[in-house]
């Protein structure tokens, strides 16, 4: 009857949870009025943008006419719109053209109009999958812009992205130096200077002005606006989007990020770098001296992976550029390259901290154990084999802790008959039963918490793996067995339909991991149930464990189906090795007869001094017992 009652309660409980989830989803539906207002606002913004673009186009046509013919009428018209910066329209550079600089790692294309990078290609990495033939482009097709808003003394507001810069490419040693100047006169200009070194992802970027004190209003800083829509580069856009976010260093070296909501805003104090981080690639603006402040915004563009297939998030940073003695002079750098821990660490700028390694002890495990060990193994063997060897080494290092856990379970299992006797003897007095049980543990030299402590020690290593493998750049496009990319899911079957929370494909490594965790829980649940008798008034853990045996593998299947194959492989091997270690320990190291004899011998000895936890628990029980007796007496 109890079993049926429990099953009925379980069914009712799961049904209630399902109803609550449906209710929450219904409640979170967008308000039609809000949706309509958002559409109207968006339409207005589009209309305003078109009007502004038309005005800019008129100025552009006039500028090209002046540059080509020297038409004084057009020049006068331009001066009304651009003031002193109409001078830039008289130069041959006042036309749509670009300059390309490249080294062995990156190729950059900088446009005369706006003076900013319009294409940034990483020459060693391909999009989506190995052999696709499409190189990773951090910037392309107008997905990025850089603009400085200029406030002139005659109250004009100009945007550098709409104006033409004069380009000049030179070489200083092996470095390529591209100067882009927005001119207000022969010797008055705003300059962007790009410096590209050989075999380097870091691009020097200086912003300075000369002779603009009589042109610009220098009473307040200029506003630098940097925008980027992050291109999709990986097989799974939803998985890539999960790890795409803004990171920054501010407040004396503190590393933080802007959050993962639909739209996140952060006001930064004294930032030294701002990183538009994608899953495996990053565009980072670095300053040699901290900016005074900055405002960053992250907006999620991937709401439905079946429809939103091009961009993951939209990033924006607004940074004030302070004047010094009436001029602008800022030494900056762009990093455009892989989000690889070792590569970023080589610059000694704390950039490696944008790679998700976890906080506290989890981060320490990843940085000081997982990263060096995996890097060492990966330098000698293929990465798929490296994951297997890595997992075995970690589990072997944990085996003494596993042994203590199994030993504690064996002791508790042997004490179960005596605990059952105490339960029968004091069934009408639960408090007395608990006290006598604690005394029995103390006499037998058994710590009931000993089985939990090893699991708590191993937990940070498990959590560290969930941070390490999704961030391991080394796994990108590395194949193993049927998986063509260990950093993405290992699809073996493409489904013609989409299953909610699961996807439209079947991955094999998560299935193997689910099978392994099922057998592991099946083998350990029996000992745990026998070792830990049910306490009166507490949930029946044995029945809960029976449910978890089946629920956990199902959760594993759904959770890992779209995760990287490297993490699923690690979990499969981890559970498999744990099962093998458990079998070896039980067969060769756990002798029930010896353990029983040792327990009986311990009972004859003077009881061990109780630990702080046991003493505190004993005191609580005694106080409760005394209160109970007092209440009974008063009645």
Image (spheres, rainbow, N blue to C red):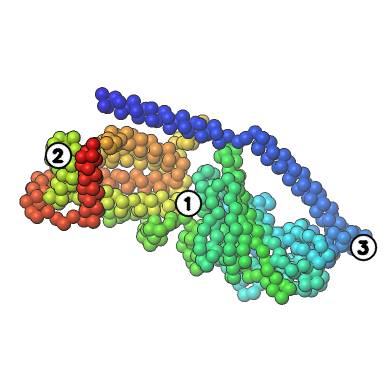
Task: From the image, tell me which residue sits under label 1.
Answer: 476
Q: Closer to the observer: label 2 or label 1?
A: 2
Circles 3 and 1, Cβ within 8 Å, touching? The answer is: no
Q: Give neighbour class at mark 3: few <14, some 14-19, many 20+ (Cα, 10 Å).
A: few
Q: Is residue 233 visible?
A: yes
**Which residue is depicted at the point 70% across and 66% down?**
221
Q: Quadrant of residue 138?
A: bottom right
Q: Earlier in the sequence, mark 3 or mark 1?
A: 3
Can you give x and y, in whole percent of width and height, for residue 249 in the image?
A: 54, 63
Q: Earlier in the sequence, mark 2 or mark 1?
A: 2
Of 561 and 129, nearer the camera is 561
Can you give x and y, in whole percent of width and height, for residue 69 in the image?
A: 89, 61
Q: Closer to the observer: label 3 or label 1?
A: 3
Q: Earlier in the sequence, mark 3 or mark 2?
A: 3
Task: From the image, tell me which residue sits under label 2.
Answer: 422
CA gap, disc 2 and disc 1: 58 Å
Can you give x and y, in whole percent of width and height, for residue 107 in the image?
A: 62, 60
Q: Is residue 119 visible?
A: no
Can you give x and y, in whole percent of width and height, for residue 68 in the image?
A: 87, 60
Task: From the image, tell me which residue sits under label 3.
Answer: 72
**Which residue is depicted at the point 43% across and 37% down?**
558
CA gap, disc 3 and disc 1: 58 Å
């Amino acid at each position: 009857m109890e079993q049926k009652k429990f099953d009925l309660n379980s069914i009712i409980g799961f049904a209630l949870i399902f109803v609550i989830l449906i209710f929450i989803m219904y409640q979170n539906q967008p308000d039609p009025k809000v949706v309509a207002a958002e559409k109207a606002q968006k339409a207005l913004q589009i209309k305003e943008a078109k009007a502004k673009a038309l005005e800019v186009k008129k100025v552009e046509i006039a500028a090209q006419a002046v540059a080509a013919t020297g038409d004084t009428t057009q020049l006068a018209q331009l001066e009304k719109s651009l003031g002193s910066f109409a001078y830039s329209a008289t130069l041959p550079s006042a036309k749509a053209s670009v300059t390309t600089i490249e080294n062995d790692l990156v190729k950059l294309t900088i446009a005369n109009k706006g003076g900013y990078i319009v294409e940034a290609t990483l020459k060693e990495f391909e999009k989506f999958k190995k052999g696709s033939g499409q190189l990773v482009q951090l910037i392309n097709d107008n997905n990025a812009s850089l603009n400085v808003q200029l406030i002139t003394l005659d109250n004009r507001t100009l945007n550098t992205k709409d104006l033409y810069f004069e380009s000049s490419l030179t070489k200083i040693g092996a470095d390529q130096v591209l100067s882009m100047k927005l001119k207000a006169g022969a010797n008055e200009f705003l300059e962007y200077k790009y410096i590209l070194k050989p075999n380097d992802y870091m691009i020097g970027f200086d912003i300075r002005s000369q002779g603009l004190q009589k042109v610009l209003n220098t009473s307040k800083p200029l506003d630098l606006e940097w925008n980027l829509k992050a291109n999709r580069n990986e097989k799974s856009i939803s998985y890539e989007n999960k790890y795409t976010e803004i990171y920054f260093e501010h407040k004396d070296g503190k590393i933080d990020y802007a959050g993962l909501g639909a739209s996140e805003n952060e006001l930064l104090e004294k930032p030294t770098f701002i990183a538009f981080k994608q899953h495996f690639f990053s565009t980072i603006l670095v300053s040699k001296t901290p900016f005074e402040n900055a405002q960053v915004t992250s907006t999620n563009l991937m709401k439905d992976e079946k429809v939103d297939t091009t961009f993951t998030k939209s990033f924006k940073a607004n940074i004030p550029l302070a004047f010094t003695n009436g001029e602008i002079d800022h030494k900056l750098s762009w990093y455009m390259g892989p989000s690889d821990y070792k590569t970023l660490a080589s610059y000694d700028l704390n950039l490696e901290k944008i790679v998700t390694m976890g906080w506290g002890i989890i981060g320490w495990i990843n940085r000081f154990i997982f990263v060096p060990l995996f890097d060492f193994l990966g330098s000698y063997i293929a990465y798929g084999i490296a994951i297997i060897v890595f997992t075995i080494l970690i589990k072997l290092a944990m085996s003494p802790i596993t042994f203590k856990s199994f030993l504690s379970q064996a002791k508790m299992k042997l004490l179960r008959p005596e605990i059952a006797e105490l339960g029968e003897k004091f069934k009408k007095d639960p408090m007395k039963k608990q006290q006598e049980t604690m005394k029995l543990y103390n006499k037998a030299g058994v710590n009931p918490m000993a089985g939990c402590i090893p699991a708590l020690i191993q937990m940070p290593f498990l959590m560290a793996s969930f941070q390490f493998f999704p961030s391991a750049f080394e796994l990108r496009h590395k194949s193993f067995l049927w998986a063509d990319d260990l950093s993405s899911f290992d699809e073996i079957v493409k489904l013609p339909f989409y299953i909610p929370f699961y996807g439209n494909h079947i991955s094999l490594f998560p299935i193997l991991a689910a099978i392994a965790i099922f057998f592991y829980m099946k083998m350990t649940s029996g000992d745990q149930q026998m070792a830990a008798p049910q306490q009166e008034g507490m949930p029946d853990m044995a029945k809960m464990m029976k449910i978890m045996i089946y629920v956990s593998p199902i959760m594993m299947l759904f959770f890992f189906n779209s995760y990287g194959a490297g993490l699923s492989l690690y979990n499969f091997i981890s559970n498999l090795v744990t099962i093998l270690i458990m079998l070896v320990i039980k067969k060769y190291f756990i002798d029930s007869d010896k353990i029983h004899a040792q327990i009986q011998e311990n009972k004859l000895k003077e009881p061990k001094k109780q630990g702080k936890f046991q003493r505190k628990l004993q005191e609580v029980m005694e106080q409760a017992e005394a209160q109970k007796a007092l209440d009974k007496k008063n009645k």
